[in-house]
Image: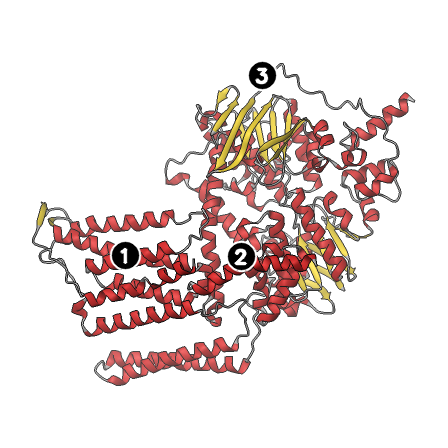
Amino acid sequence: MDGLAKQEELQNERSPFRQEKCLSPGHPMAWLLWALAAALPALTTRNPAYLLLLFLAAAAVYGALPDRSEGTSGWGWFWKLALFLWLFTVPLNALTAHYGQTVLFTLPDSLPIVGGSVTLEAAAYGFLSGWGWLGVFVAFATLNRAVEPYRLLRAAPPLLFQTGVVASIALSFIPQAGLTLREIREAQAVRGYRRRGLRDLPPLLLPLLTTALEHALQLAEAMEARGFGNAPLRFPGLQRWGQRLAILALLGLLAGLLWRGFQGENPGGLFLSLAGLGLLLLALILQSRAIGRTHYRAQRWSSGDLALALAAGLDVAAYLALLGLYPEALAYTPYPRLNWPAFQPALGLYFLLLTLPAFLSRRAR
Amino acid sequence: MIRLEKVTYTYPESQDEGRPAVPALADISLEIGEGEFLLLAGPSGAGKSTLLRCLNGLIPHFYGGAFSGKVSILGHDPIPWGPGRMSRLVGMVFQSPEAQCVAPTVEEELAFAMENHGFPETLMRRRIEEVTSWLGIAHLRDRRLDTLSGGERQRVAIGAVLVLHPRLLVLDEPTSQLDPQGAEEVLEALQYLKETLGLTVLLAEHRLERVIGYADRLLYLPGDGGRPLLGRPDEVLRQMPWVPPLVTLGQALGWKPLPLTVEEARRFVGKPAGGENAGGRPRPRPSSRPVIRVSGLSFSYNGRPALRDVHLEVFPGEIVALMGANGSGKTTLLKHLVGLLRPQEGRVEICGQDTRRVSLERLIARVGYVPQNPDMLLFADTVAQEMDFTLRQHGRPAGVYGDLPALLGLQEHLGRYPRDLSVGERQRVALAAVLVAEPEVILLDEPTRGLDYGQKEALERFLLERRRVGRAIVLATHDVELAARCADRAVILENGRVQAEGSVREVMAGRLDFASQVQRLYRIPGLITVEDVLRERFCGQERR
């Protein structure tokens, strides 16, 4: 009775959490698609209007997501790095690209690389490139907030599953190494150790390296003892065919590439390499099917996930079409003289669609 | 159920050094029945871990090396099966709770092994439900692993192998990194599993006093080619060189059958032998000035209080044991005493210097701090270089070690690579590496972790020797027997507050959860070690 009551209580306690889960999107694939949609313009356009919109959209989503870090704040360095990269691209581009008409000042020509006129346009372009990179950073930081890296990596298809698990563990090693390094630094400082130059690094790095290696070995042993890498083969025949197909596909791909290399104008090469790629994909699917590994609580697609995936998929498709057909709609360059960027209101929709998860998550909360 | 026939195994590293290979296991034959709780004991390097790893095929599959003989688990040979397939029969749990988990949350950690074996999801749910209730961790299911205590994490690690329904559970020192409460949680859980599921449990452990009461049989590996002993715990204990204090007492007083737990020993202790005047060690005269003076110290990490209003004085020539559960603030306090942390409130004075006003360099000339994990310190190619490094950093001539290597038994190892040494030896190298600078104050964090009885005794001798020459020693420890044997005073921390402070005898009399076996048995203030009891009896008889 007591146990039952407790169970009920537990379930009640848990239920709001579950509900929240179905409303706000949480499927790794849906979010990956979103991150792709967000990163695409950041990677391809330098139009400040679109970059600004992208930034605002991503920030809105980031802000709407609950903070999972629980005060562990391992991301401080990430933002510092992003900001540093952004600010770094401005002087870098200004000093190395000598185009543009608004000359700010001129460095003597005798200086290698940096010598020549330093222009406002070059600085602006550096600023915009850095901004683009910051957009990519924000997209991935949001992805990281929405889906734990662990889940993202574990959503890999069964054939790549082991790689995914190993990568997810490697990821968890990073903050751990930071903690160990602090312990080592303290332990050595108390022995009178002071770092003055590179020669003083071994007392810090050697213990870190050996501890990390020992830790990795222990973990590997523990995983092996729990049957890791020992997934049963559900359909051995399927796997064999998958392997043969993979070899065939690779051969086709190679032949196609060679054909294209020698006779670029002949469409046969292109066709052959595309066929090879397709077959390779098929081989991957076949082999994945053959492995009898299962997934506990495999993330199901909720309505929120579907909406997100649909919106992001639409975005990506539309953007790629635009990029292929009317690339000039997205293009912007500050050269030769800094000018006002063009803005297509229709493209604003793209970024509006990107903010969808912010609404979904907010409603869930 | 488990049968080993003439098992001999040599690690690959010991094969290729040109010397004759030293097998880690030599010609071991054993038979272990189903549903037993078998305790595996023996000094460091005797082959306990090696033996355990033979049972699921990690040896030789994971380690390589030369293996001969035959192992059979329920009729299955781990060598053709390999550790992956063997995991259905043998569940293995390791020492460090951190180094064996793969997932961020409890539930996913529990599912990992079943995913590897391709269990359908409904079965996985059922098994997780079942295992969490067996181990009393149902309330932790949605928690993140890094928020759990050591005892909870170790129970999750047990659950993570139990979901496959193995018939044999093998644990390699699972409680060595836990505080007494955490260790008890784990052992109680194992006891329950054995009784309700008929699971066979095989557990290796150094601190016999913790575990011996749970064991049905004891397997002792003496190392150095000696024959292993297997039998009822009391029989095997009689033939072992180092035993828990209670057993030593029972042997000295001729108790039969030899009691293994305090409860069993109670019937031999009739009326207490009147020990209110039990002397104990003379307390050092507080006429000398304290070398450590802590007053009103409070400290918090990001708003989480770790120490609250702590007062403490330590005088030259005394040993103070700092006890308390994990997370009670012991390490934080030690770090304040060496100046790695500075007080947010209150004062810490070391040899009359306020730590907030003095640089770390000035402080460490007076204070030596040995952290919990010796591997954090060791980096040099030889033990001697390790000590030279500290000497140079302190501006002293290298090569002048005094009697330290002899005291710590390191003379033969001076030219060896520290990381090749055993845990106990590495611990002593770390001690030497810090204490070679001759600090007046010695701070040790959990110095007996992973040490066997022989190594512990050597450490005790060393500490008493340092105390004799007037050093002030503070040790943070879970090891109540160490505290009982060599500390003068004890301080118990709870949630960052000093809960009890006084002579070790007084404190243990007042706090049975931090008392030695002898104290818990007699419950007479002043009786905390075997020697106390024997002296008391001897004196009593003379008086009569």
Helix, strand or loop status at disc 2? loop
User: In this image, B489 relative to A107: left or right?
Assistant: right
Name the residue carrying label 2: B105
- The front one of A357 and B454 is A357
Q: Can residue B365 be seen in this view?
A: no
A265 to B185, vertically: above or below? below
Q: Distance between the residues labelled 2 and 3?
A: 51 Å
At 12% from the left and 50% from the top, the residue drawn is A120
Name the residue carrying label 3: B289
Q: Distance between the residues labelled 3 and 1?
A: 64 Å
B354 to B47, vertically: above or below? above
Specify which label sits upstream in the sequence, 2 or 3: 2
Residue A55, numbered label: 1
Helix, strand or loop status at disc 3? loop
Helix, strand or loop status at disc 1? helix
**x and y percent of residue A358 in the render?**
36, 60
Read off the chain for label 1. A
User: In this image, B411 relative to A103: left or right?
Assistant: right
Residue at the far right: name it.
Answer: B544
Q: Is residue A8 visible?
A: yes
Q: Which amino acid does label 3 sit on?
A: Arg
**Quadrant hosting residue A64:** bottom left
Q: How crowded is mark 2: few (under 14 residues within 10 Å), some or many (20 or more)?
A: some
At 47% from the left and 30% from the top, the residue drawn is B344
Which of discs 1 and 2 lies nearer the camera? The answer is: 1
